[in-house]
Amino acid sequence: MVNASLLAHPLADELTSVRHTRPCALVIFGATGDLTKRKLVPALMGLAKDGLLPTGFAVVGFARRPWSDGSFRTELGDGVRQFGRSDTLAAFEQLQEAFTFHQGDFADPAAYHSLRLELDRLDQKRGTAGNRLFYLATPPSSYSSILQQLAASGLSREADGSFARVIVEKPFGRDRSTAQALNDQVREGFRERQVFRIDHYLGKETVQNILALRFANGIFEPLWNEKFVDHVQITVAESIGVGSRGGYFEESGIVRDMIQNHLMQVLSLVAMEPPVALSAEAVRDEKVKVLKAIRSFRPEQVAAATVRAQYTRGSFGGEDVPGYTEEAGVAPDSTTETYAAVRLQIDNWRWSGTPFYLRAGKRLARRATEVAIQFKQPPHLLFEGGKQPQPNVLLLRIQPDEGVALRFGAKVPGPDLRIRDVRMDFRYGTAFGGETADAYERLLLDAMLGDGTLFARGDEVDEAWRIVDSIVEGWQRSGQRPLGYAAGTWGPDAAARLLEAGRSWRKP
Ligand code: BG6
């Protein structure tokens, strides 16, 4: 039974969370690429399996290669088999007809004219009702042509109550000025509410759980500030190297590839003020305020507040692995960083004086993404003798082994009053069981629903680049080479110097 007082609440829609997708056609630019096969179509089939796709639905793959509908479908079927959740292949087999291929050059107006005719035809044939979702899954060098053509052809226009939306993959620019140029270009055809900038970390259940943990519970928020929190560590450690992406990584480095987007997004969810509602604007207004409260570094401050490093040859799981400069597509004298650690200060009432330490790296000892909130010690330690209790840590394990743990001191049984650290541990797998949906499922669904909460707004991207640009500029001016760390370790020892006052990096 529905609670009547709930329905009267102005936020009833959000609280009851019943959401319906409208029919639509999804046009994927760059549909012959890896992302479509590995992520997008398997995610769509996950939605299909759970009955979350609209009834009127079609996918048009737009790319330069001369593929047919048949070869497109074969390739996608392969992708679903390899990368889809269990039982999604059956969904794909049932929905095959919904996938068509449109060959064209991204800069050719004629290709957009024929795309429009194709979409009109699908409105009739598959009931897509004039609603269009454009997904830019190409290399960023093609974004500009596509956006220009979408605006010029009128495909970005919303007519007669129908919607036109654009999803932009990362990387969104390679610095603040290219991101601003891209934002300007996006806005030539689309309004902000039509734009969905992907950061797949926001699609992860455990990242969304940061909001749930903070704002669905009464016990954490009173402690969530500089009075009680000693510092926060945000770690995204990967065990993989750059693999076949050496060419791309050379142009980006870990600070652009991971910190500007994923770590900054996680940081803003951890540090933001409570939003007035769970609406896209209210949540993103608070996130951007946190980013604005982080001061840019002056070039001469960067050396003391950051550490950058590059992996050298080492071993992983008993096997020798190459150093970064030995990877394909990487210059032998490359100075690109594969590890970065940064100490950030948030200049607002909540966090003044509480450092946030961020680190991300490739080829580290293990894969682990986590947020550790370390609390201050009690004002007076009563327990003498033996080991002093360690500070309390609230650990949000984003992946793998998703969950939340609280470390606290407990009495060791026996006649003496001795304290030992123990953990209260919540594990997603144990509590909820089942297979969790991939981040792209949630993000594609939300874009179809027109809900931008889990997407980066233009101003958030801009602020994150402002901070990252100031770091990169400091590194460039210093002209110093990155430090080295052996593959399979926790990064350079020098990273310890960022943490003052007896603090140390966690080893997840
Ligand atoms: C991507 C980066 O955005 O995120 C990759 O470009 C990185 O370099 C990946 O490996 C990590 O994502 P996840 O979901 O595996 O943590």
Image (cartoon, rainbow, N blue to C red):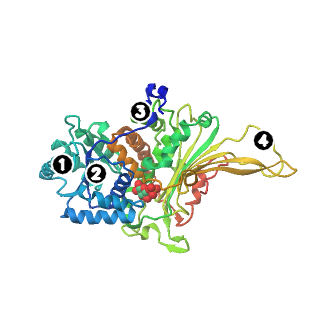
**Nearer-N-terminus badge (3/1):** 3
Mark 2 or 1, which is nearer the eye? 1
> Residue 416 in the image: x percent, y percent?
86, 50
Amino acid marked by disc 4 = Leu
Amino acid marked by disc 2 = Leu
**Residue with the mark numbered 2:** 136
**Nearer-N-terminus badge (4/2):** 2
- Tag 2, which secondary structure? strand
**Residue with the mark numbered 3:** 13
In three-dimensional space, the C-alpha distance between marks 2 and 1, rounded to whole angstroms, equals: 17 Å
Mark 4 or 2, which is nearer the eye? 2
**Residue with the mark numbered 4:** 381
The quadrant of the picture occupied by the C terminus is bottom right
In the picture, the disc for residue 346 is: none
- Tag 1, which secondary structure? helix
In three-dimensional space, the C-alpha distance between marks 3 and 1, rounded to whole angstroms, equals: 32 Å
CB-based contact (under 8 Å), mark 4 and mark 2: no
Q: In which quarter of the image is residue 292?
A: top left
Mark 1 or 4, which is nearer the eye? 1
